Image (cartoon, rainbow, N blue to C red):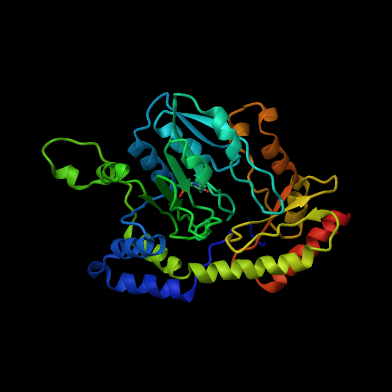
Amino acid sequence: MIKLVNSFLTSYDKEKVNNFLENYNNMDPINELKGKIKRIFQINNCYPVNSGSSALHIALMSIGIKENDDVICTTHTCVAILNAIKYVGANLVLVDCNYDVNKMDYNIKLKDINKKITSKTKAVIIPHMFGVACEIEEIKNIGIPIIEDITLSVGAKFNDGSLIGTKGDITVSSFHRTKVISSDVGGVIWCNNQKYEKNIYSILDYDGMYSVQYKKTYNYVMGDINAVLAASQIDQLEKFISIRRKNADILNMELRDFECINIPCIDNNDIYFRYIIEINNEMTSEYIVNEGIKKGIQFGRGVFPALHNVLGLNNDDFINSERAQKKLLSIPVYPGLSKSDLIYMCDTLKNILRS
Ligand SMILES: *Cc1c(COP(=O)(O)O)cnc(C)c1O
């Protein structure tokens, strides 16, 4: 079976993890990981944590979000974001996504954010979806704290060439094995706005456990082995991204003259975390996913179900997300796929579309 998602662990990763196990008591992998992330993103500090969900929870707590506050996010994303909002008792206010096949842009529809803002709105969460940056510059002046979630696009860049994760007030990422960077499980949080730095430190602070005055803290810190793997994967990020682009080039070559689909044509700021096409005959992506499994391929549907589906909201308010779920197909593109895997997937897809 060619899976939709796979971690790409290299001999370099294995060497780093083995070396750590042999020197277990004499190493400080968390600090090493912090150093690498700080250098890449040009930030003052960051906090490796045990999951992306924990990072989101800390982000919301550090802004001070509490019961009955509103948090705005796109419907077309992962349920972990809904969970984190529930952890602090806040309400999720959903916005539809873009639908731009050519740019592979299914990020939050920025123009619709303003329509949803009230006095209860306390934060906006922006997940950069599928490897493509959401241009948040234009919503920064609203004055509501922005949490960038870079999980699915680590290494992608904004139009101005700066890395995503450098413009919001707080940045979070998951390093779960199904994402861009794998630490098996794990994540990271940092802030670009000093206002929240102290709060993040205080939420994670272990010293607090020994102080006379009780203070509630969260044991969300990343494990050392996970930190070794995260650091080793980050060392290879550029290489991983260039393999993704090469794989996407092969898919482009194989699929570009085929009439029943529209393919993406994206620029070098994007990392091809996903390769998403639009089906323009009468078939649905659900049908193709089921046919693919019979041929040993896990095609995907981008996001399915979306958050408005999970919450039972009116589909008519989320036209682009609904269309995306019916007509988009995600083709595996990660490092570790061989050229023959890629060609087999394209041939199989064409056969299904012709049948
Ligand atoms: C997977 C995911 C998360 C959650 O990360 P975990 O490490 O699984 O808790 C958060 N945000 C996005 C965009 C994700 O895709």
- In the image: residue 121, left or right of residue 43: right
Point 47% across, 35% down: residue: 142
Near-viewer residue (286 or 334) = 334
Q: In which quarter of the image is residue 195?
A: top left
Q: Quadrant of residue 317?
A: top right
- In the image: residue 263, left or right of residue 70: right
Near-viewer residue (159 or 83) = 159
How many numbered discs sit on the rendered protein?
0
Near-viewer residue (213 or 223) = 213
Point 31% across, 55% down: residue: 45
Inspect this view and state whether residue 210 appears. Answer: yes
Point 76% across, 59% down: residue: 295
Residue 98 rendering spot, x and y as whole percentages? 65, 43
| 61 lies above or below 131 | above
Residue 112 rendering spot, x and y as whole percentages? 60, 34
Quadrant position of the N terminus in the picture: bottom right
Residue 349 rendering spot, x and y as whole percentages? 79, 59
Quadrant position of the C terminus in the picture: bottom right
| 236 lies above or below 159 | below
Inspect this view and state whether residue 218 appears. Answer: no
- In the image: residue 254, left or right of residue 200: right
Residue 315 rendering spot, x and y as whole percentages? 68, 30
